[in-house]
Image (cartoon, coloured by chain):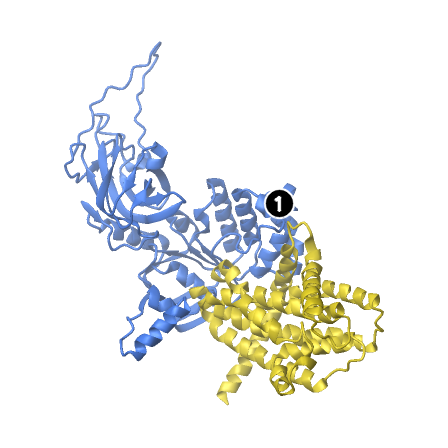
Amino acid sequence: MTPIEYAIEIEGLSKRYRLGQSGHKQLLSDVLRAITKRHLGKKEAQAESIWALRDVTLKVRSGEVLGIIGRNGSGKSTLLKVLSRITKATSGKMCINGRVAALLEVGTGFHEELTGRENIFLNGAILGMTRREMIEKIDGIIAFAGVEKFVDTPIKRYSSGMRLRLGFAIAAHLEPAILMVDEVLAVGDAGFQRKCLKAMDDMQSRGKTVLFVSHNLSAIDNLCSRVIWINNGRIEKDGPPDEVIRAYMSSFAAADKQTYDFRTLDRKGNGDARFTHMEFMTRSGAPKDTIFSGDSLIVRLHYKVQEKITQPHFGFKIYTETGDFLTEVSTWGTGFDVGELSPGSGHIDLAIDFLNLMPGHFLVSLWVEGIGPVWYDVLEHCASFDVEASNYYNSGRGIESRFGLIFLPGFWSRDATGTIPRAVVSSPENG
Amino acid sequence: MSDREKLVSRMKSALAEFWQYKDVFYFLVLRNIKVRYKQTLLGISWAIIQPFMTMVVFTIFFGKFAGIPSDGIPYPLFTYSALVPWTYFAVTLAATGNCLVSNANLLRKVYFPRLALPVSTVLSGLLDLAIASTVLFGMLIYYQVDLSWELCFLPLLVIPLAVLTLGVGMFLAALNVKFRDVRHAIPFLVQLWLFATPIIYPVSIMPERFRPLASLNPMTGLIECFRAILLPDRSIDWSSLLVSCLVALLIFVAGLLYFQKTEAEFADII
């Protein structure tokens, strides 16, 4: 018998979602309204629909580790949902060889009132483990999660970290032929994320087929043998990781650099406030075309408010070009009271005293949230900027991307006694 | 023909899947049972308190004050013998009707046979039914009723009762995904159904011409059969039981078909 060559074969797969009030008909009154409209000869407003996936054709070999990247709302998660049969494709053919375990969330179906042990069985069964398998593996799962002491305590007493570890421990003990993971790694601390990546690496070495959706491009680059980039529901590019990641990254760079326009981007949040665009400016308010290491600059975030908002908080995040999270600065963290935003347009400025980044290409994410928390607008990786080398030390050296990510302004001295003199350097030019 | 073949193959694959996912059913039933009375003071005794207190209230108001006849049987016994299966039906129907919506996150995030949710809800209700029945036997002894050999039929009678509950429950659960009106309609529906079923009153006080209509309510034949088995001087009305079982089966098939027709889009619209 020849081994099954392809774990997944899909052809012309499309998925349409209906949007808007007329699509869902959540309430009986909507149906009645639609019927009366039809009888009165009025046309029902065309149900708005979006194609989350459009004509996707893909073959995944068994044993292959396929990374799936793309912006929010591009259709990555929908693809996993269709492949794992959570939802049905609108059209197209799909053939899957082998048992699938899809991990769209850690600890799905955990019940607060049940103990850790009871939840292991319930969650394991839901993810496709048999009772016998679980009896064999339960000790391993408990040890992996490190919850030995609390295994007979209801999980409502667990910390969120314990819950996460337990959920992942169960998932790591699954033995599916095909594993699909959606952005699970976005949660948890660095140690947990390393553990997850290690477990996925093990899956691969045991010859499992893995589909991995993530914004963490360096994880994708490390784990995957092949990457597809999904854009607007279509496969934009398919190939070796570095090639596809580079193409994906350059799609950000192609965006207009001076004013970053966000109005048409896909985003999360309820839309009560929305970022419209962003500008980099010098301290004196002039547009800033080039950003140097060590610069002092202002980031101006323009927004539009629909509903009156009190006490919102704004956040600005920087990622490396491979998607590693570098830093965040928020109004909450700095204790800045934004006050009240009334409907209309406005802007908020973030002054950065000293941009301590080495030259390179960086990504920006923005968010604005309110008490609750409610998310008004969340833009992941919505913009990118380049940092250029500056002559900070007047040595013409030392500030290059090969020296790392972070620019740590330092001063050396030898055989010094008493107070160590500070570096005396010229303030960096504002370009 | 191809339609029928399609239906047969769909049923077959559904059964195969049932088997593959049997542990999910098992653990969902276990979960429902364990969770139901967690962090309650009275625990599982709620399974007795509900029908029992209803019986007390019915006896005082309908038996004593309103003087509703009970075919010569002590009214508490008369009404409790019907309230035991009825409470199972009413409580389980409400739980089944809401089982998809209350597990929305599960539907959105994992694949498993969607039927596991209503089926496990209906099965886990059976424990309460068994517990409530023990009190029934206590009452039979208290009223010195001779227990007949027909009692062996009692567990069999639970089958059409559960099938009926599942049938209506599946339909309501699937409808609930689309229209949340169902959640509000269920208690109302259950209340109306209570009065349409001979629980408070005997069939004998119904005018003759309404009886065929009443027997279309599958709960009528089932409840009357429960009473015939438990209480003295009553014999099983086989024709009415047959009609009830057929109607229950019909409702079950209709509920199943509707459920299967709509389940593909549960995750999208819930």
Q: Which amino acid does label 1 sit on?
A: Ala
**Residue at x 62% of width, y 47% of height:** A154
Query: Residue A120: x percent and y percent?
Result: 61, 53
Q: Which of B201 and A118 is in front in this view?
A: B201
Q: Residue furthest left?
A: A286
Q: Where is residue B242, by image quadrant?
A: bottom right
Q: Which chain carries label 1?
A: A
Question: For chain B, what colour was chosen?
Answer: yellow
Quadrant where the N terminus of chain A is found in the figure: bottom right
Query: Residue B120: x percent and y percent?
Result: 61, 65
Q: Mark 1 points at which residue?
A: A143
Quadrant where the C terminus of chain A is found in the figure: top left
Left/right placement of residue A320 relative to residue B9 reads left
**Residue at x 74% of width, y 71% of height:** B78
- The residue tagged with tag 1: helix, strand or loop? helix
Q: Which of A196 and B17 is in front in this view?
A: B17
Question: For chain A, what colour was chosen?
Answer: blue
Q: Where is residue B239, by image quadrant?
A: bottom right
